[in-house]
Image (cartoon, rainbow, N blue to C red):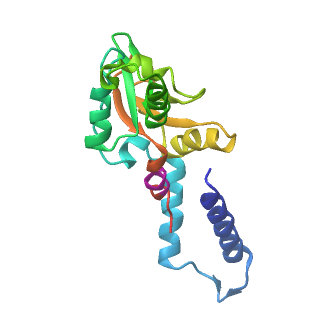
Amino acid sequence: MPHQHRSALIAFASLRNAISHGTYYGGRPIAEPVEAVVQEIERLRQLILEPPRALGALPASEVRVVGPDDSIGMALDHVRTRGFSQLPVYDGGGYAGVLTTNAIARWLADQLTRNTGIAEEEPVSHVLRFAEPGEDAILVPRAITVVEAIDRLSRGRQAGQLTTALIITENGRRTDKPLRLVAPYDLPVLTAALAIT
């Protein structure tokens, strides 16, 4: 449960105790919640009972994928024209990895020292070898909630590891088609979906 929700529950519990156990005048409590507070209590109740799904909270976004045999030039075109910093890599059997701009930069630095020819013709699979350990996406099912998505993206960062992205698929399987890529830059939108005030 997000800290904001825990704090609100404690405050609302104090309000409830003040109303239930506080002073009464003419058979009625002297403290009553204002309509805005009642609406916030109802919103929090709804968020707890039916947490929003990450897929519904985020704006629609086309997932561009590349294959391991595609040229790095093709992948770089997606980076340049679409501003992507992560590209899921899918082969015939399903998910094969995630190509990041960090891996591309490390590969390019290696290419420059080797001076081995035309870099843009190199296959994506070769560039994937330059990914750092743990630089991978986590596949999650479409039913993942906003709270779960925030937790999965944040968990690695707290442990000093790198969670590059979540890839939402139908069932969270490697063989499922990607429905949405969720990256750390999506955290503000996910967090806003949980706001109660």
Residue 119 sits inside the magenta stretch: no
The reply, left or right, for residue 48 in relation to residue 86 is right
Q: Is 131 situated above or below 19?
A: above
The reply, left or right, for residue 115 in relation to residue 37 is left
**Residue 11 % position (x, y):** 66, 69
Location of residue 65 by image quarter: top left
The reply, left or right, for residue 85 in relation to residue 159 is left
- Residue 17 visible to an observer of this rendering: yes
**Residue 44 % position (x, y):** 53, 59
Q: Is 90 situated above or below 9?
A: above
Residue 190 sits inside the magenta stretch: yes
Q: Is 87 situated above or below 58?
A: above
Name the residue located 62 percent from the left edge and 65 percent from the top edge: 8
Name the residue located 44 percent from the left edge and 49 percent from the top edge: 186
Q: In terms of secondary structure, what is the magenta stretch mainly?
A: helix
Name the residue located 73 percent from the left edge and 80 percent from the top edge: 22
**Residue 43 % position (x, y):** 48, 61
Magenta segment range? 187-191
Tell how many labels.
0
- Residue 141 visible to an observer of this rendering: no
- Of the pair 145 and 152, the residue shown nearer to us: 152
**Residue 110 % position (x, y):** 49, 26
- Of the pair 120 and 127, the residue shown nearer to us: 120
Question: Which residue is situated farthest in the top direction here?
Answer: 93
- Of the pair 56 and 162, the residue shown nearer to us: 162
Name the residue located 48 percent from the left edge and 75 percent from the top edge: 36
